[in-house]
Image: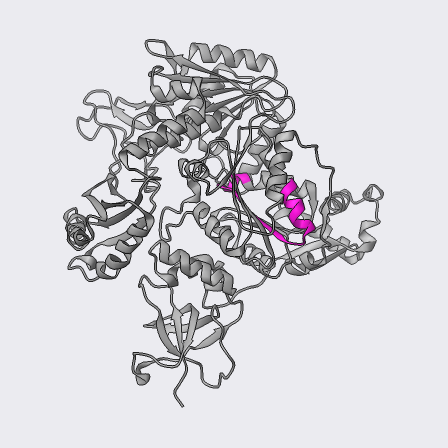
Amino acid sequence: MSAKILKIAVPVPLYKCFDYLVPDGHNKTIIAGTRALVQFGKRQLIGIVISEESSSEVPANKLRAVKQLLDEPLPSELLNFLQWAASYYQYPLGEALNHALPALLRQVEQKQALASVWQLTETGTQQNADDLTRAPRQAELLRQLQQHKKGMDKAQLDKLDFNWRDSLRALEKKDWVKRLSQREASALIQATPLLSEKPLLNDEQKHCVDKVSASLDQFQAFLLEGITGSGKTEVYLHLVEQVLLKQEQSLILVPEINLTPQLISRFEERFSVPIAVLHSGLNHSQRLLAWQQARDNQVQIIIGTRSALFTPLAKPGLIIIDEEHDGSYKQQDNFRYHARDLALVRAKRLNIPLLMGSATPSLESLLNSQQGRYELLKLTQRAGKANPPKLQLIDVRRKPMQEGLSDYLVDLIKQTLAQKSQVLLFLNRRGYAPALLCHDCGWVMPCLRCDAKLTYHHHKQLMRCHHCGHETRPPKQCPECSCEELINIGIGTERLEKYLNSIFPDANISRIDSDTTSRKGSLDKKLAEAHSGEADILIGTQMLAKGHDFPHVTLVGILDVDSSLFSSDFRAPEFMAQQLIQVAGRAGRAEKPGQVIIQTHHPEHPLLQTLLHKGYNAFAQSALTEREEAAFPPYSALALLRAEATQAYLPTKFLEQAFERLSPCQPNIELFGPFPSPMERRAGRYRHQLLIQASSRAALQQCMNKIIPELNTLPDANKVRWSIDIDPQSMF
């Protein structure tokens, strides 16, 4: 009898599966998706069984047996979906599957100890914390546990401002608290959908809810275009309630980690059901737990960033993509997928509706709605009594400026603070100053590993590259001319904060960027200050540009719009317009009117004029016309073949060889390049790229299927790192 052969996708950068023998003594049927521990060369790796075959092209005496078949398999639906995704994005299947697995399921040494949760016992729920007058810490802990009916884990307990361990042990001895694994705790929660009263919907919101609700048992893609503050989240909540009543699951994707706590709190306030959270800020045990809970139908709501799309769903009912236009949905390295586009494919395969929401929809989505692929839903009014903010361009040419602020904007800040309202200043450039300049000879301190300048960070007295992370102390004198007069040029958020503290000493100023929110819990704290109104002036980068609801902000200042107006990337105007509208939307979201000031040296710029007088939709239609005339996406399909090496000539040489292999695909495709990346040298490596354009995705895929297997056979393939990016969102 011939031996059974398993085809296994192994996490290595090769576009093939590998044959292994079934382990000795194993007689049961092995399903596709089973995890397998295999020997690959000198390493042991976790692969995924793709199929069971009766024969192999490799001689039987050269085949190795699988060392061990493991539990926690990939469900068949998710496996098939990932196979399609790997094929479309031209990425090795083994690595794509590995990317989708929680980290603990990728590890050879299985360490899957799950975190604990502490819940009140039935006796504990009946206790009055005020009776513990001699044990104030136990009383406070009891109050916290009574508020968190689902229990508290270590991360939540660590946020308490006292040592909770002794108090917890005391409550456990009284049999008021019990310790459970998080899976056990979730299984005990009863799924009672509605917890709090839901606000009434306006007519537009009700129309949107009714339209999507009518399609809950079938696939339909909806684009919800709602101006900032129009109540898109309330539409999401009403739809999720409908799904819960059907005892099905909802998957909600958000673009950034910093948006998840805000959204989770809205859902927890509304529903008394288990909610799983998935994003890169969680530890490995937390991510595995959420993955397992979703697969086992122990959670009905799953909220996460782009990788949450690969969560197994036991009873899928609805997928929601919030801020669908956001560039964060595109993975920019390794498995370069776009979560929004893949969500469409998965929803269709699951036969459930997909709802994509945005105030500034992507041009791709707008075109799909115009062509009838998506059903367009609109929210044109702000929820409640809020009115859209007033936008104003300020021409700063020949005007005095102090640290990036015009006198006019400073006066408006004073007036806003006097009215006890909040100010938000947007500057998408962190650090103190973007460059260090020699006043004598003009030398500017470069990064030695990138084609970029080092940014000065005043608080840490460091020069830092924001591209490769290189850090060094600022020099005491110029290395070119020995001059000691080195000056900081340009404005970053840190420098702006310092200046505002000097002119508004009594104001509470909060800077929110990746430098001030790197510590655990710091972002939550700063956002809480912003939401409560405790912070008078908010200074932020794009972290503040989207999704946040700051009811006390009435003035938004956009300090440096000009740097985004001129770019060689054809997508830059779209990204800039979306960012500007999103930032502006933070103003006037409650009853107080909002005002948005846009400082510019180019007030006559067509993009600014269109946005100011006609709005985002007029800009989008104009941009679509330009894209069609230039045959750019979404009217064509692109792939970007990138190559990098430590020697400058090697990437070009490799791409020239690839160009020759691709040439027979013409005229179905057009080739542009090879040419240097916008930043040619990064982290010590030289980078070049070859742009491949086709009239359709089908034509592009046909070409890619032909060329990808040949790339590793090119003469210089082993001298460079190369990658393929299907539907690139950035030429960087």
**Quadrant containing the C terminus in the rendered view:** top left
Q: What colouring does the structure picture have? A: one colour
Q: Is residue 673 left or right of residue 202?
A: left
Q: Residue 493 placed where, x, y %? A: 42, 27
In the image, is residue 481 above or below residue 277?
above
Identity of the residue drawn at 34% across and 20% down: 606
Q: Residue 726 placed where, x, y %? A: 33, 49
Is residue 239 within the magenta segment? yes
Q: Residue 690 placed where, x, y %? A: 22, 46
Count of numbered circles in the view: 0
Residue 129 figure quarter: top right
Q: Relative to the observer, which residue lies in front, 601 or 417?
A: 601
Q: Is residue 428 visible?
A: no
Residue 52 figure quarter: bottom left
**Quadrant containing the N terminus in the rendered view:** bottom left
Q: Relative to the observer, which residue lies in front, 213 or 518?
A: 213
Q: Is residue 505 visible?
A: yes
In the image, is residue 371 above or below residue 110?
above
Q: Relative to the observer, which residue lies in front, 332 or 495?
A: 332
Identity of the residue drawn at 50% across and 46% down: 305
Q: Is residue 330 left or right of residue 445?
A: right
The furthest residue to the bottom: 1
Q: Which residues are the magenta region?
A: 238-259
Is residue 221 within the magenta segment? no
Identity of the residue drawn at 40% across and 73% down: 38
Q: Residue 697 placed where, x, y %? A: 33, 49
The furthest residue to the front: 372
Identity of the residue drawn at 38% across and 77% down: 20
